Image (cartoon, grey):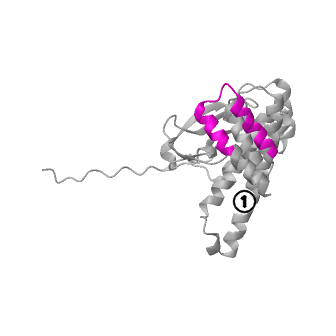
């Protein structure tokens, strides 16, 4: 009989899920090494009401922007690619001139503050490039998620918070709501002017997300209209239609109780 105990599962840290991926900046041609989540490594353990995936041991949202430390250009990885010349010139003129180049950060793990700085640069670059509403919508949604993650890290026992922690919590919550509202507005516009897939979401997925966001902000008629569309769509599966019916009942109850 073996005296050996079964080995305890190895504890994984955020850095264990990451590797450095090479990119070439499409604005200044600087060679970049960007921390990237290894494909298939991070496991989803839950999903929030607005589709935010929660992974074990790592917040993958922190690693979704390519940011050039030389010229300041930043973009969501999904949209990374060759830039038209006029866009390059605009970034050089409006971002790079004011940007303070710095060495690449040491190590792969990023803090929420670092991630938010990169996302907000990406948002600025997106506005300058006059991108589609869907790209701004996805950026603002992910920024809201980064604030939510920081809020959740403080715990949910708000009664026991010191005044300083309470202030931090409220700041994260306000920022989360502000960016969620922006995400709803931009993605609603995108839904009217762009063809699915919108920000990588098919028609049913974007309508679920928009219905959830509209419900969150008390726009129950819009939410009910979106969910009715899911019920009528040939693309929706029976389980999606069941979920849509539950949402429709919940929105009608909430609307009647306002
Ligand atoms: Zn660059």
The answer to whether one can see residue 76 in this image is: no
Q: Of residues 119 and 8, which is closer to you in this image?
A: 8
Say whether residue 91 is magenta. no
Classify residue 213 as left or right of residue 47. right
Q: Residues within 10 Å of mark 1 (few under 14, many from 20)?
A: some
Q: Residue at x 70, y 66 (%)?
A: 168
Q: Could you tell me residue 4's position as x and y percent? A: 20, 52
Q: Residue at x 74, y 36 (%)?
A: 228
Q: Quadrant of ligand 1?
A: top right
**Please, what secondary structure does the residue beneath circle 1 have?**
helix
Q: Could you tell me residue 36's position as x and y percent? A: 57, 38
Q: Of residues 244 and 187, which is closer to you in this image?
A: 244
Magenta stretch in the rendered image: 221-247
Classify residue 181 as left or right of residue 163. right
Mark 1 C-beta to ligand 1 under 8 Å: no
Q: Of residues 166 and 224, which is closer to you in this image?
A: 224
Q: Of residues 61 and 111, which is closer to you in this image?
A: 61
């Amino acid at each position: 009989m073996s005296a050996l105990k079964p080995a305890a599962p190895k504890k994984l840290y955020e850095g264990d899920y990451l590797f450095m991926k090479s990119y070439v900046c499409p604005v200044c041609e600087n060679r970049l090494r960007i921390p990237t989540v290894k494909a298939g490594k991070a496991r989803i353990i839950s999903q929030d009401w607005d589709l935010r995936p929660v992974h074990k041991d790592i917040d993958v949202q922190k690693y979704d922007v390519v940011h050039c430390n030389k010229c300041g250009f930043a973009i969501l990885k999904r949209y990374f690619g060759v830039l038209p010349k006029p866009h390059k010139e605009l970034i050089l003129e409006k971002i790079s001139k004011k940007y303070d180049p710095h060495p690449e950060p040491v190590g792969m793990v990023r803090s929420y503050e670092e991630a938010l700085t990169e996302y907000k640069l990406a948002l600025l670059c997106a506005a300058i490039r006059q991108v589609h509403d869907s790209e701004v919508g996805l950026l603002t949604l992910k920024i809201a998620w980064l604030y939510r993650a920081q809020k959740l890290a403080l715990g949910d026992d708000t009664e026991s918070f010191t005044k300083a922690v309470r202030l931090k919590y409220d700041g994260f919550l306000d920022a989360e709501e502000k960016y969620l509202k922006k995400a709803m507005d931009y993605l609603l516009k995108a839904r009217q002017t762009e063809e699915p897939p919108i920000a990588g979401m098919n028609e049913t997925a974007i309508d679920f997300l928009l219905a959830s966001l509209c419900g969150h902000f008390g726009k129950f008629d819009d939410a009910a209209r979106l969910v009715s569309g899911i019920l009528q769509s040939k693309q929706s599966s029976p389980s999606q239609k069941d979920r849509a019916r539950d949402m429709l009942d919940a929105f009608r109850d909430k609307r009647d109780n306002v």
